[in-house]
Amino acid sequence: MIKKVILLAICIACQYSHAQEAPTRLSLQEAIDFALENNRTVVNAARDIDAAKAQKWETTASGLPQISATADYQNFLKQQVQVIPAEFFGGAPGEFAEVIFGTKQSASAFATLNQKIFDGSYIVALQSAKVFLQISKNAKTKTDLQVRQSVIDAYGNVLLAEESIAILNRNITVLEKNLYETNKIFENGLEEEESVEQLKITLSGVESSLNNTERLKKIAYQMLNINLGLDVYNPLLLTDTLELLTEQNRSLSLLETDENPENTVDYLIAENDTEAKALMLKLEKSKALPSLDVFINGGYTGFNNDFNFFNKEQQWFGSSLFGLNLSVPLFSSGMRNSATQRAQINLEKAKTDLEETEQRIKLQIASAKSDYQFALEDYENKKENLALAQRIEEKNQTKFFEGIGSSFELRQAQTQLYGAQQELLQAMLDVINSKTALETALNSVILN
């Protein structure tokens, strides 16, 4: 019995040790690198490149020699009867003789080689396959940039929640101490009950904010896991701090970066689309050109009334054929001309979209620079505001406990302090996110 209890305890301990999985430790850069390898969208984008490479070779191979083989076996369950004039065999004129031509069974095997000599659509298809591969690569780059931005945003939200919780807990500790001391003063008849109630209201509001932030923290961790490509409940331990990342992302030199839309992935994708539309126009025009194919085949055929095709005595008769196939489009009732006009219109639309994309990228970069500069300025402003709010709160707290300040003034100073604390945290996050948005707009981040 004791042995069974010990064995059961060991099993439970092993299960518990597996359940207590060690958290994944990640700095922000490690999180980005991990996501660029494991994020599900990134993985599928890499697969799209592999599929484009396979399609490119598929298109190329369609113009290379093609060899096919066929095997045929026939067995007449009842052979067809033919009638011929009987006089061919010495019969009376006007009479017919019934005859059966051929054997009851036959088998044949042939191999055929086909080769394109000229086909305009094939040449266009080769060019299109190269463009499609480049589109897939540019799409992968854009996906990497978007995932990087999402990871930074999610990582920052987790740090924001963690920092908020730490600050709220410190505020609650201070408020509980103030409430305890104020309550003692009230019990001794040296303070009004309103002062106690004011502190209770403030404490209740901070506790409610703490509970809500705790819930938001769980969601933030789950969102980060999804962006990393991990299980949504995977435990994480973030090694960077919000303050450290804010200092690392303060870079005025980025604001001086030249605006060159032609280097951005959005412009390259729009340019790819224009190239694709130009090739579609070329394809429609190529349909008016002739095409030429060459083929050669050869094989053997055997005949027998019984299935003896595998016997050595079976006779096989060989044959071979060489030929050319020339196809010349002559008249399509205007169908090809209409298709060409439609392709030309789509090309003009793509060129207009390319110009629109260039202007939109310029505006996006200018807007991102403005947002980043504002975030840097706002961060400095919020730091100063917090320092002022702390001093004001400390003064009002001193005045309150010395009996020369009201509870309303203290509560107002505390509320102002708590607001300044949250505003500074948000300003820090804005510096990180706005810099990331600017880097994404400029494509200044080198991705593997």
Image: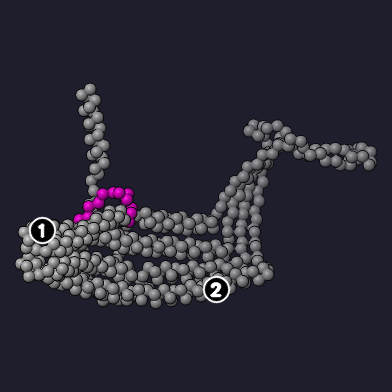
Q: Is residue 397 magenta?
A: no
Q: Is residue 143 left or right of residue 89?
A: left
Give the amino acid at mark 1: Asn
Q: Neighbour class for label 1 at 10 Å: few (<14), some, many (≥20)?
A: many
**Mark on residue 183?**
1
Q: Which of the 4 quarters of the picture holds residue 369?
A: bottom left
Q: Nearer the viewer, residue 260 or 67?
A: 260
- What range of the chain is rendered magenta? 225-240
Identify which residue is drawn at 65% across, 65% down.
328
Identify which residue is drawn at 25% across, 32% down.
11
Judge whether residue 117 can be spotted in this image.
Answer: yes
As drawn, the residue found furthest toward the top would be 1
Residue ID for mark 2: 344
From the image, state whether disc 1 or disc 2 is nearer to you: 1
As drawn, the residue found furthest toward the right would be 93
Q: Position of residue 239 (x, y in %)?
A: 20, 56
Q: Is there CB contact under 8 Å for labels 1 and 2?
A: no
Label 2: element kind: helix
Q: Nearer the viewer, residue 232 or 118?
A: 232
Eyeballing the image, is 394 above or below 81? below
Identify which residue is drawn at 58% across, 63% down.
119
Position of the N terminus, as image quadrant, is top left
Identify which residue is drawn at 10% across, 58% down.
183
Q: Position of residue 301 (x, y in %)?
A: 67, 41
